[in-house]
Image (cartoon, rainbow, N blue to C red):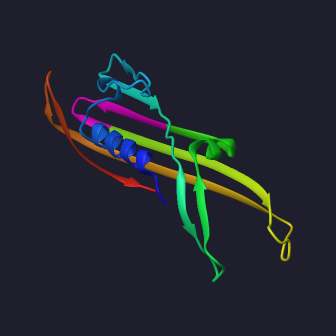
Amino acid sequence: MKLGAARTLSFIGSLLFASGVMAADAYSPMTPQVQQAETDEGWTFAFAPYFWAADLSGDVAQFGLPTVEVDSSFSDILDHLDFGAMAIGEARYDRYSIFGDVLYSKISGSAGTPRGIVASSVEVTSETFAGLLGVGYSIIDDDSARLDVVGGARV
């Protein structure tokens, strides 16, 4: 399978977030503006929805059946997208932080079988969920830079 652009964007986004750079610090026309709010108690909150655009290509084989080539462009995948949600959020207090990232998508489709021997049609549904929850501590936190040490769990 090939997810070139999506992997690259995800990797860059992970580096920016893990290094303490907020999405608003990196300009891109595809990056929404992060809304930050500070409370009277010193808490700051940030939230940013985001979007991945990916294609899919490769070979699929199952149960000893012949290999089938898969080649779907982003527009093909978008035609079959039932629902998708992606967002990242962070809450900070002094040098401490807690953050989370959620990605969910549901894609479905149907087609007729070529010979209709076993079945006349096939329906496929794919649901994907990924979640990250982490905590961090700023070992460097001044006006020009911030460096966080973080740990977390990903599902």
Label the magenta part by its dominant secondary structure: strand
Nearer to us in this view, 142 or 84: 84
Q: Residue at x 28, y 30 (%)?
A: 93
Q: Is residue 35 magenta?
A: no
Quarter assignment of residue 61: bottom right
Residue in the foreground of this view, choosing between 74 and 107:
74
- Residue 148: image x %, image y %? 21, 40
Q: Position of residue 154 (x, y in %)?
A: 41, 54
Residue 147 on image: x %, y %: 17, 37
Q: Residue at x 64, y 81 (%)?
A: 63
Q: Nearer the viewer, residue 97 or 55?
A: 55
Residue that appears at 85% across and 76% down: 117
Q: Please tell me in which quadrant of the rendered image residue 36 appears.
A: top left
Q: Residue furthest bottom?
A: 64
> Viewer-proximal residue, 135 or 113?
113
Total numbered labels placed on residues in the image: 0
Asked whether 93 falls inside the magenta stretch, the response is yes
Q: Identify the magenta region.
A: 87-97
| Vertical comparison of 121 with 91: above or below | below
User: Is the residue 4 above or below the residue 12 in the image?
Assistant: below
Q: Is residue 83 above or below residue 32?
A: below
Q: Position of residue 66 (x, y in %)?
A: 64, 78
> Residue at the location (34% across, 46% down)?
11
Q: Is residue 149 left or right of residue 89?
A: left
